[in-house]
Each structure stands twice: as structure tokens, then as C-alpha cells.
Image (cartoon, rainbow, N blue to C red):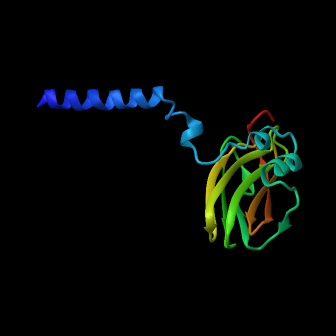
Amino acid sequence: MKRRIFLKSSMAAGAIAVAAGAGLLAPTRVLAAAWPEAAFTAKSEADALNAFFGSADAQDSGDVTLKAPLQAENGAVVPIKVMTSLADVEAIAVVVAKNPSPFITSLQMAAGSAGGMFSARIKMGQTSPVNCYVKAGGKVYKASQEVKVTVGGCGG
């Protein structure tokens, strides 16, 4: 019985070694979407939005909801939730204007997605507006909320 387990494990390890050697386990081949490096390295909100969406123009929308605490006791873990009822959602992005790197996170949606929900814990260095952007139907929509950070965070 143990011989069988040993043989199966050896075959699995061999298959993984061959896949790794062929470059099939490289993250660039595994991940579906390209990482938006220009957005994450941008130093301003407008530059980040231009890099991610191709435009910094966004309109406020009641169909995009951002839930975040009014006051965060620990800026290192601020819970947020983004919800939208818009049709044909392409992407969701979260930006904290006063962070050293304002572009916090993004999510690419499957083609033809109707609505969407995204939650995360983000890091904030200081009190700042948290802006959520949703690209749907070729337009960018926005929701904002000011979050007051009282302790710690990222460099503030």
C-alpha cells in the first residue's frame, strides 16, 4: 500500500517539475489579466486612473455604493465594500488620494457582468477620501467617502 502512494507522489512531483521547467507555472502565464503596473506606481489619483481606465473622467452615480467606516481606529486595516447595480461592469478600482501610492486595488470583471460586489481591507496612512471607481458600458462611475484615521497606518 505504501509503495503505491510513493509511486503516485513521485509521478506528481515529476509532472510538476516538468511543468515548472517548461515555464508553465510562471505567474504571467497563470494570471488571466496583466498587472496594471503604471496605475500602482502612479503618484497621483489622476495619473493612476489614466493608467488603469484610460481616462480620469468619472461621474458620481447612485448605482455605485462604497461602504467604509467613518472613523478607522487602525489605518493598517480599514474594511471597505464596493457594490454596484450597473450593467456590463468591466472593472472596479479603489483609490485613496492621500496615500503615497494612491491606487490601492483593482478588480477586472468577466465580460457582460451585471452588477458586482467587492470587499477588502485597505491600508490608509492618514485621513483621506476613499474613492471607488466602476467602469461599466465604456463609462467610469464614482462613489466616495471620507475615512478618518485615528491611529497608525502607512507612514502617517
Q: Position of residue 147 (x, y in %)?
A: 78, 53
Residue at x 28%, y 30% (from the top left corner): 11
Left-right relation of 108 to 138: left
- Give the number of callouts: 0
Quadrant in which the N terminus is drawn: top left
Q: Position of residue 7 (x, y in %)?
A: 21, 28
Residue at x 69%, y 62% (from the top left corner): 90
Left-right relation of 48 to 108: right
Residue at x 83%, y 51% (from the top left corner): 49
Give the vertical position of 17 relative to 130 (above or below): above
User: Nearest the camera: 34 or 130?
Assistant: 34
Left-right relation of 76 to 146: left
Among all residues in the image, which is located at the extreme left? 1
Figure quadrant of residue 109: bottom right
Q: Position of residue 10 (x, y in %)?
A: 27, 26
Figure quadrant of residue 36: top right
Give the vertical position of 148 relative to 143 (above or below): above
Q: Position of residue 133 (x, y in %)?
A: 77, 59
Give the vertical position of 29 relative to 119 (above or below): above
Q: Is residue 137 visible?
A: yes
User: Nearest the camera: 124 or 21?
Assistant: 21
Quadrant in which the C terminus is drawn: top right
User: Nearest the camera: 150 or 46?
Assistant: 46
Q: Is residue 68 visible?
A: no
